[in-house]
Image (cartoon, rainbow, N blue to C red):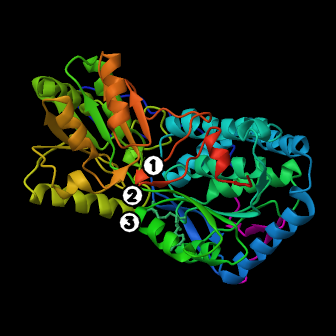
Amino acid sequence: MAKEKNNESWEYAPSLESTAHIQLKEKYDLFIDGKWVKPKSGKYFKSINPANEEVLAEVAHANESDVNLAVKAARKAYTNVWSKMAPTERAKYIYRIARLMHERAREFAVIETLDAGKTIRESRDVDVPLACNHFFYYAGWADKLEYAFPNRKFESLGVAGQIIPWNFPLLMAAWKIAPALATGNTVVLKPAETTPLTALKLAEIIEESGLPAGVVNIVTGYGDTGAAIVNHPDVNKIAFTGSTAVGKIIQKSIAGTHKKATLELGGKSANIIFDDAPIDQAVEGIVNGIFFNQGHVCCAGSRLFVQENVADKVIRKLKQRMESLYVGNPLDKNTDIGAINSKEQLEVINKFIQIGKNEGAEMYQTKCNLPKKGYYCSPTIFTNVAQSNVIAQEEIFGPVLTVQTFRTVDEVIQKANNSPYGLAAGVWTDKGSRIFNLTTKLRAGVVWANTYNKFDPTSPFGGYKESGFGREGGMHGLSGYVKLND
Ligand code: ADP
């Protein structure tokens, strides 16, 4: 099959990752109390491959009664088994899950790419290794918690309800499940409706690992399933990653209850390029920050700020680099930008692109031929953008970048912080003192210096302002799952 031509002067032979070794069931039930059970709702929905619109599998749509069963199983497992188990024993199970995931890394990567539309390069090199490493990392903490909370008395919370989005499906499941288990909690997890398959594969691995029944329960469904978890009276903790709009609903629902929460929400992160920055590396950092993973990253560097005297150079080089980006089949190892996760999300992105044009910003899109089937979007930048423009304020969650210029450090700090969000930022400069000056003044949970979108299980992640609260990852990620008593 001839690969779609992206650019006149570049053409690669396709290099498709094989799907021969992937085993998907036609129909997935709910994973509750260590067993696969049919949904009481009797309903199933289809999970679609956004790269070609083909149905991958049917998946159960859990209702309130199904969620109730899952919470009951998690409570029973918490009271009778998991909270009583020696931490070293708990650690062994978590290690076992990590090892089994590692052994089946390729299978996970291909399923993630099929279900989410993200490139195989990303799921193979980023999502799956990081997900394994989260389990390895938190397995290590399970029997060392007294060092995480020195001189404090702590106890686990009980049942954690965890709701995750579609941009890093397996990785988000790992971020949520691993620290919860390490601290002695049990779990009811709901993956996003467009990307349930790797969480269901993870359930198979959990089954294989011999983890006691009910310690991890995986219920699939839509927002109503998530709401049933949030509102269940016997859930002690809600861990949510997703949109700020749903985060606000959740916060209202649990106000006045005993439930503890961590919310990781939207972002509109600033990527700041000074005139002394290594420009070519910075251009790669911009591309990595917004175009790889189709801009489906809550901390995407979606607002670019370039110092005025190098703006022309940076924009010229960025456009040149954009022209060499391959948009197409995510299973192809040459592909830089895969499919947009769903038809609905593509519509959202296109709506914002139209708003940008109507606002009078200047648009540049690469001249690539998008595949005829599936949901795709060309990398897009807007210049001549004002601070007040909708495209510079609202989260687009697609490969769309706004470019603004600045002259002084104070000006860029003010501009970067002028956002309801505060998830992440990037700073590109040769001067260490400038990096330290900025990192203390930018209201963002993570600030990368001379790099972007780098993750590690040992470092905490989370936001300020409307990007949420609480930290996931690192030692800080344990705090959200314990009660400190004195
Ligand atoms: P996104 O815009 O990234 O899709 P959402 O916030 O809509 O983010 O979805 C993130 C997760 O939250 C998904 O698993 C989704 O099903 C779930 N969800 C959506 N609405 C609600 C709700 N009202 N209560 C709980 N979970 C919800």
Against 302, residue 187 (above or below) is below
Give me the C-alpha separation between circle 1 and circle 2. Answer: 8 Å
Q: Is residue 25 magenta?
A: yes
The residue carrying mark 1 is 463
Residue drawn at x 79%, y 39% as measured from the top left: 146
Location of mark 3 (residue): 344
Give how far apart the Cα atoms at labels 3 and 2 are: 23 Å
Q: Is residue 39 visible?
A: no
Gap between marks 1 and 3, in whole Å?
26 Å
- First in residue order: circle 1 vs circle 3: 3
- Which x, y percent locates residue 313? 14, 23
Residue 433 or 136: which is nearer the viewer?
Answer: 433
Q: Are marks 3 and 2 in contact (CB under 8 Å)?
A: no
Callout 2 amino acid:
Glu
Q: Which residue is denoted by mark 2 in the rendering? A: 466
Residue found 17% across the figure and 60% down from its top: 355
Tell me if 211 is positioned left or right of 176 in this view. right
Which residue is rendered at x = 56% and y = 69% of the image? 46
Q: Residues within 10 Å of mark 1 (few under 14, many from 20)?
A: many
User: Residue flagged by tag 3: what amino acid is it?
Assistant: Glu
**The magenta segment:** 23-40
Secondary element type, mark 3: helix
Q: In terms of secondary structure, where does tag 2 sit? A: loop
Residue closer to the observer: 420 or 176: 420
Say whether marks 1 and 2 touch (CB < 8 Å): yes
In the image, what residue type sits under mark 1? Gly
